[in-house]
Amino acid sequence: MSFGWKEAGAGLGAAALGAVVAVGAMGGFGHGGAGSPDPKATGEIVRAYILDHPELIPEAMDRLQDKQTAQAIAANRDQIEASFAGAQAGNPKGDVTLVEYFDYACGYCRQSVADVDRLIAADPKLRVVYKEMPVLDGAISDRAAQVSLVAAKAGKFGAFHHALYAVPAPLDDTKTDAVAAKLGLDIAGLDHADIVNEINANLSTGRALRMSGTPTFVVGDQLLAGAVGYEALKAAIDKARRAKS
């Protein structure tokens, strides 16, 4: 499921070009007299600078995208870092929180389970929050997310999370219900308001942060899309920790 990176990129390109033009306009000050920029001189300065430094455009786009992402995270941080019932791991009072948006039908999320477990084992100050993002396989993803939240309310999130990802793909309702039954979960209340509201809130946050799919990780002011691996996640956690200190 896409949340609109393509459209966002187009806007970033225009903004980045505008920033370069503004710099050029400053450089052209005084050529037209009375402190006003000379349009012809400004255009020549901008064109020459862009031709000499074409790398500035993607660099400016990346910086603007990072800034906008950080602002979106800050605006939604309370919802992002809030744990639904027991859907968290690691140190509940950790100094850094890593948030994973995931879908049980997602193979890349399955691939990331070991990386997140390794981070938790290696970092006693890390808190991990898991966020259901059922976007890949319709009703099958939805049901798995709902059962997962039932498990969280029963204090069995970690057991359910690992057991369902251990079941061979592809995901289906029979596999989800079998794991639930093995753990003794009562799944009669999948449509309870708190479960529905949690999933809807996660999807809304995904749109606000322009997430492109699952898994997506949020830590500090950073957003990492995809199964980026242990080292990339560790680097992001270290960066967030340095920023706080």
Image: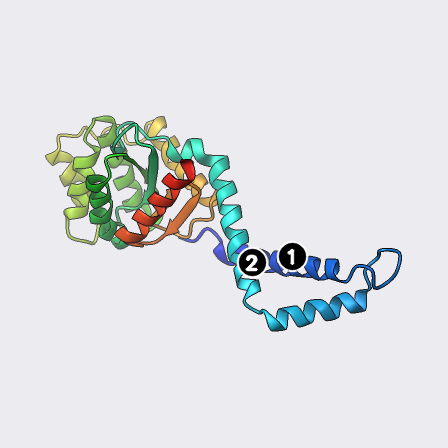
Q: Mark 2 belongs to which amino acid?
A: Ala
Which of the 4 quarters of the picture holds residue 13? bottom right
- Tell me what residue is drawn at x 20 percent, y 27 percent: 155
Q: Mark 1 belongs to which amino acid?
A: Ala
Viewer-proximal residue among 18 and 188: 18
Q: Can residue 134 be seen in this view?
A: no
Q: How many labels does the image show?
A: 2
Read off the residue under disc 1: 19
Viewer-proximal residue among 195 and 159: 159
Looking at the picture, how far across and down is residue 218, in whole percent?
38, 43
Read off the residue under disc 2: 60
Q: Is mark 2 on a helix, strand or loop?
A: helix
Q: On the picture, is 67 further left or further right than 20?
A: left
Measured Cα–Cα span from mark 1 to mark 2: 8 Å
1 and 2 marks in contact (CB < 8 Å): yes
Looking at the picture, how far across and down is residue 110, in whole percent?
23, 50
Q: Is residue 110 visible?
A: yes
Label number found at residue 33: none
